Amino acid sequence: MNLAANRNHNLGVIRQMKIRKSHTTRWITRRPAGAALLVSVLVLVVLSSLLASLILRITMVKRRQAYMVEYQRARYALDSAMKYALAVMPNRSFSLTSRAEMPDFSDLFVMNSEEYRLFLETWIETASDDQIEKILKEDAAVTAEPQWSTEELLGRLTSMIEGQTDESHDPFYETTPTETAEFMEFDPDDVQVPGPYGPAWPYVIEPIELQIGSAKVTITVEDENAKMPLTWAITNRQAVNKQAEAALAIFCDWMGMDMIQREALKDQLEEIYDRKTFELNPSPIMLPSQTRTTTTTTAAVTRQTGQVTTTRTTVRTTPTPQRAASQPQQRAAIAHSTDFAKLFHSSLLDREALARPVTHTALPDQSPLKYLALWGSQRVNVNTAPRHVLEAALSFGAGDPTDLVEQIIRKRQQEPIKSINEMKDLFYGDSLAIERAKNYLTTTSNFFLVRVVSQSGNARVSAVATLVKEGRNVERLVILYGL
């Protein structure tokens, strides 16, 4: 009995253990199912992230490739347009146009919106239809409405009060068209005041627009002699240092530059001065004689091994044969302009600060950089420079140049000044000041800037070339890309 009872007891214990083991096993087998789901979700998330990253990379590569294609098209069009511009420059002549009875460009830079509108309205009151048409842009929207004089309005009111409403008794209807004034409404943005060459200052021709393949190209030519040369501020002539400082001060005053901006500009010019100084009518640049190094090596071959062994090496320095005395090795004097162009477009000068727009003018896109010549020009054209540039140039003479500049502006608006000697005869009282400043003045421009901008799709490239043009002779100085 005891054995049977013990056996039954053991069997019961075993059954309970199996049941517990079964429950435990079931609990353990359910746990990996949730973990697998979690792992699957994580894997899907990772794969989705990788797929999105891959798609983004592929899209970026495609965009980069598309941009490179557009860039190549724009660059090809740029090079073609630049070659075209340089090829036609010898045959182009840039002559001044008559601006008599036309609004003058000299003082537009300092006018605010209200002064600019009043300036145009005052001129339009006495201008003819042909003159008004010359200053309007092609897409200008101008409306003209009848405007009656005070007498005509009083006459009409009287007739209305007296009951005269028919045309036979109303003096309003008896007014002939020639007696009726017109009031013209215009937007100042639709007006383009002509410069000395006809187009807006400082352009010498209207911008040329071309379509080369898929690229749109714009070519402009600017008169560099109409701007103030920044080289004046780094002159090597001690006698005119004060005048050079006065010229720079006049320019900074007109541009509204504060003391911090002026000091920063002076510091940058001092760094450029340490590398190269400005000289009036510079002579050619003589190049130092070069030396040629000759190395002579004596070698011997051993009979037993056939190896080459060096036994002696001599170094001899001999001067390079000089050219004939009539043709020394040198750079032309115009190379000075190239050197200044590279210096002013290097990191030594903060052109970004000079390109910031000024706020005291109604004209768009005005900045000191627009009125500065950074390409090595020496002189200012008295027929094409705005007032503040003229004042800066004539500050190299004696006295206050304000009155003289006003006389020059009045004269050139009627007809251009032909020579510096003629200017001294015209303004005899200021002939001494003109004589002292004559090295900084000219009456004919010969320094031009050709700018080409090409755009194809999202790619935009640009280049600038500077030229010295004397009649049909054109000398290219430098071409810089990305400006």
Image (spheres, grey):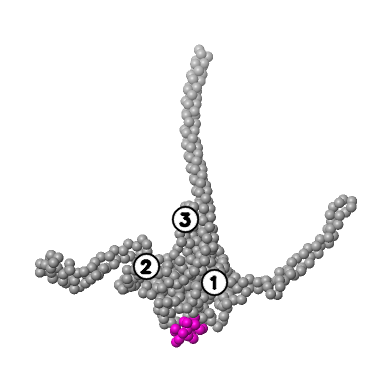
Q: Earlier in the sequence, mark 1 or mark 2?
A: 2
**Residue situated in front as seen by the camera: 282 or 82:** 82
Measuring from the top left, give residue 27's x and y in whole percent. Answer: 47, 28
- Secondary element at tag 1: strand
Q: Is residue 237 visible?
A: yes
- Among the 4 quarters of the image, the one containing residue 239: bottom right
Mark 3, other Cα within 10 Å: few <14 / some 14–19 / many ≥20: some
**Residue at x 54% of width, y 63% of height:** 87
Residue toward you, 457 or 269: 457
User: Would you name the residue on which mark 3 appears?
Assistant: 211
Q: Secondary structure at mark 2?
A: helix
The magenta segment is 420-436
Residue flagged by tag 2: what amino acid is it? Lys
Residue marked by disc 2? 134
Membership of 143 in magenta stretch: no
Three-letter amino acid code at the position of disc 3: Gln
Badge 1: how crowded within 10 Å, few (<14), some, or many (20+)? Answer: some
Q: Position of residue 113 (x, y in %)?
A: 35, 69
Q: Give coordinates of residue 329: x percent, y percent.
A: 67, 71
Kindly identify which residue carries mark 1.
Answer: 470
